[in-house]
Amino acid sequence: MNSRFIASLLTLVLLATSCATVVFDDGQVSFVDEDAQLKCSQPGAIMLAAQAVPTATHIPCIDAMPSGWRIEGTEVRSDRVLVRFDSGRAPIDDLTLTFTSSCIPASTVIDATDSPLGLAPGATISTEPTTGNPIQGIRLAVTGPGYCADFDVELGADEPIDVEDFPTWLWIERSEIDSWVFEGTNQELRLDP
Amino acid sequence: MTTTHEAHRETEPSNSAPLLRKRPTGGPAPLPRSFNRATTLGLAVTAAAVVLIAFSTNEAIRDRLWIPELRLMNSIADNRVSWLTTLLEGLYDASYRFAVPILVWIPVAVLIVTRRFRSALTFFAGFLLVVLAASVLEDIVLRPRPVGIEILGAWEGFAYPDRKVAAIAAAATSFALHSIPHGTFRRGTKVVAGVFVAVFAIAAVYLGVAPPTAVITSLAIGFSIPQLMFQWVTPPSVFPVKFGQGNTAHLEMTPQRVGAIQTGIVDQLGVAIQSAKPIALDGSAGSTPLLLETTEAPHVAPTLFAKLYAGSHLRSDRLYKIGRTLLYGRLEDEATFTSVRRLVEYEDYLATKMVGLGIRTAPCLGVVELTPEREYVAVFEFLSGSSELGDVIEAGGLTEQMIDDGIEIIDQLWHGGLAHRDIKPSNLMVTADGRVAVIDVAFGQVRPTRWRQSVDLGNMLLLLGLGAEASVVIERARVRFNADEIADALAAARGVAIPTQLRNALKASDRHVHRDLAALSPARPKVRLQRWSFTRLGLACSVVVAVLLALSLLAASARLAGLLP
């Protein structure tokens, strides 16, 4: 092996290292930046989510992640927020949150007030099984005033799941987010007009 | 008869040539490397973008910028006019939905169809790099969309920089640079593209989607990255945007380059040149061949041949060798040259070495530096009045003398410890006196393997067999080579070991040249061409990983840009 070949290999390794934030997912690549995730410690991301769903009275944010879980990617656009998780272990394979202004609730309303999903005042949680060949899953829909948070769980094994294993969520009131903006702009502006 | 070596002496500039400079002047090279206006502008805009982004990551500075511009945006939003809002909403939505795919996919497809792969890749990579850079930067700055304003247009991700504005700017810039030939039409396209991008940017601010500083930064990124990639990867002086112009490996003979060649040859070889014109471009991809007409002077031939070498040829040589190593393993010397200077030095050395061995070839009269380490010209004697051996064979003019000459050349190469490695119809010339000379020695090799020597002989026999009976060729070859050597040569000359031009000529021939020649020689099993080594496996794995990574990154960036679902 000549020096040029070794240099090429090193370049490749450096390239791979520089792409450390690139996460492979089912043959796809997404760009993940920790600061841009919908975490309760990231006011910028929460504000952006609030702008994406301007009707929502509460905005979800991730308070804590069980060990082994990681965020695969977050997409925020003018009508929805999408957060994809990888649990890293069976029976849950993947979890996707889609936060929009509205959705059709799931078939069975459940009492999950103390679950890690958390519930803001006025919100309800419903569930139903989802089918997909060959993957089976469960849908958990949290609906509240002006919003719907759809948790889509893909199961990697045929075992019962426990929502206690989920990431813990908090729901931030829009008025609280407004106060951050209000403060940041010398008490001139709020998030919404 | 004048031998090529004597001709060399006739045309060789002497130290007393009045035009020759004994030492470099110390001034600029004949074709100095310079940043053109477009590159300077691209760098300046990049610097401006970097400054803006740096400001945006500093809380104290950004508040001074952001709050006033939010006030401005509030004022604009408060005074929106309904008809203008409707118009800009439609334009904004349609522009991103249709313009980006049209401005990217169609030109890239056209560039691929017209075999301008480098431009296609630069276009696509430049565009995706902009989207990727915008996406990464927006996650660093973390600026929400404008607050306190009703946002009327669709958006994605954080506001600073705005991915859509950057993508539109990149698509328009890349389209104008890579798809439109230089000249009035490109200038017109730039104006139209500029207006289009400006309207989109204004719409983004008016509709409350992105603040002005984000739009300006996005425009800077969207313009500068494609502009710099265009100038550095596909510089127009080397890769001019032209369609239907044949081999794109050749350098454009701009007035500046022709002038530099004239100046360089006068200063460095002492020969005044009237004109420098490209010649036989189809037969050469490793350099740009030129025909030089000299100013009438004693001891100077009226016509010279030259080969122009630049970085593009060096890269082509590297890619060719890497490709061969991947496909066949290390059949022979596949080491790449480290610089253009080394490449041209090697050709000069081999030509001089062959002349020294008495091989009939065009002697190298000298090497001229146009741009240090980047562009050189090797000047050769022009074999005046000569024809390609391939044409002579086609016309049925192959003589026994020519057969003997061809075989003698291979014999001389073997004795000299050399291989030509590119024995094909266009590399053997029949001079005005009916003798055969070999040219284009740049691919030659010192101390070749037995296999490579056999390939040279085999290819020569096949070439001569196109114009003469197999029995005659073998009979003449037996004068200098024994039966085993001939049998080895015919067993080795197969597949990729035969240059494409010779392979095509053999296919076009109505005779089965190889079979006829082999029938007159001892039987030999075919020589296997595949060579396996750790280098080949390592290289193959690296290339596969790199390609997969690059494709994944491209696909991810294309999805970010909305080019893929």
Image (cartoon, rainbow, N blue to C red):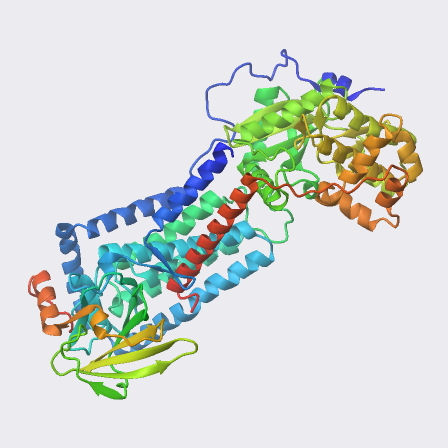
Measured as percent of width and height from the top left, residue B333 is found at 62, 33
Q: Front-most of B495 and A51?
A: B495
User: For this rendering, which residue is in front, A182 or B235?
Assistant: A182
Image position of B328 with respect to B103: above or below: above
What residue lies at 46% left-to-right and 26% top-to-bottom? B28
Q: How many labels were placed on the picture? A: 0
* Residue B432 shows up from this direction: no
Say which quarter of the image contains residue B485. top right
Measuring from the top left, give residue B417's x and y in whole percent: 71, 23
Residue A185 horizontal/vertical position (percent) = 10, 62
- Check the image and name the residue furthest to the top: B16
- Of A179 and B330, the residue lying toward us: B330
Left or right? Give the position of B302 relative to B77.
right
Determine whether B515 is above or below B185 in the image.
above
Q: Residue furthest front?
A: A159
Closest to the observer, B545 or B96: B545
Q: Dividing the picture into quarters, in which one does residue A166 lie? A: bottom left
Quarter in which the N terminus of chain B is drawn: top right
Left or right of A115, for residue B496: right
Question: Which residue occupies the extreme bottom position in the image?
Answer: A107
**What residue is drawn where x is 89% and y is 35%?**
B473
- Observer able to see residue B512: yes
Q: Is residue B260 left or right of residue B129?
A: right
- How far from the left and from the top, in percent, is residue B505? 80, 46
Quarter placement of the C terminus of chain B:
bottom left
Residue lying at 26% horizontally and 86% vertically, measured from the top left: A105
